[in-house]
Image: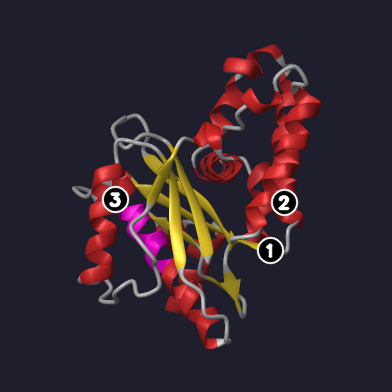
Amino acid sequence: MYLLYLDDSGSAKNVSDKEVTLGGLCCYEQTPFFLSNKLDDLASEVWPDDPIGLEFRGSSIFGGKEYWRRIKKDARLETYKKALSFLEQSTAIRLFGAVIDRAAVSPEDPIEYGFEQLASRFDRYLIRIHKKGYHQRGLIILDKSIYETSIQRLAREFRDEGHRWGRKLVNLSDVPLFVDSKATRMVQYADMIAYALRRYYTNHEQEYFNIISKKFDNEGGVIHGLVHSTFYASGCQCIACLQKQNVSL
């Protein structure tokens, strides 16, 4: 079984957020044990009094919220980079991300549009490894949100009728599973991926994105795991848009 953990950064309901990001990591079912232990150990270093209670969320780390408000900013940012480095160093994961300009997909909901993009790309990844002899099903796991009902409905539609690109999602074992992010370090990783994408695309900060940029699902030099939906793709210099520009040429 391959698992895709997803979380979002930016609110689809907040009009001040021009872009909404979804970030996630895909791995075989055995991998979460080892990656979660790394965050547990890091939490013990940062907050030894209550490491289990320390939740790794990008906005909380940067904003100094909750437990993080008692930690100096430089230490918070170094901790964030160290957490991302665990993903950079792992050979057992692939990352996925969708950055959706709300105006570019209006009147559609940007979260639902981004989920459709990533669900289809995850399914295509499973098809690729199936062709190589690895016969595995997939399951998508997300943080609990107001989108639980609509995303489960979409997943059923994609499985039974197909998504907008015409293909049914044939490799997903069930509808997405929603969990409390406080209970799983893997969803916390997904949140930090989404936040790194947000800092890169909205704040134009490359430092954090560069740590994980090579981990987005790719094969033969083609990036499959990252999509940027924007009106200005022809002028965007991100790796996803540059790839589309080269293809069009």
Can see residue 116? Answer: yes
Q: Which residue is mark 1?
A: 92
Magenta run includes residue 147: no
Instruction: Give the numbered dot on residue 151.
Output: 3
Among all residues in the image, which is located at the extreme right? Answer: 45
Amino acid at dot 3: Ile
- What is the magenta range? 113-121
* Sooner in the amino-acid sequence: mark 3 or mark 2: 2
Residue hosting label 2: 34
SS assignment at label 2: helix
Q: In the figure, is residue 89 to the left or right of 158? A: right
Residue at left 66%, top 53%?
212
41 on left or right of 208: right
* Horizontal arrangement in the rendering, residue 70 relative to residue 187 (left or right): right
Quarter of the rendering containing residue 43 = top right
User: Residue at coordinates 42% horizontally, 77% vertically from top-left?
Assistant: 248
Instruction: Name the front one of labels 3 and 2.
Output: 2
x and y percentages locating residue 11 in the rendered image: 36, 34
Q: CA distance from mark 3 to mark 2?
A: 29 Å
Q: Amino acid at mark 1?
A: Ala
Q: Is residue 206 above or below residue 223?
A: above
What amino acid is labelled 2 in the image?
A: Phe
Q: Are marks 1 and 3 in contact (CB under 8 Å)?
A: no
Give SS at disc 1.
loop
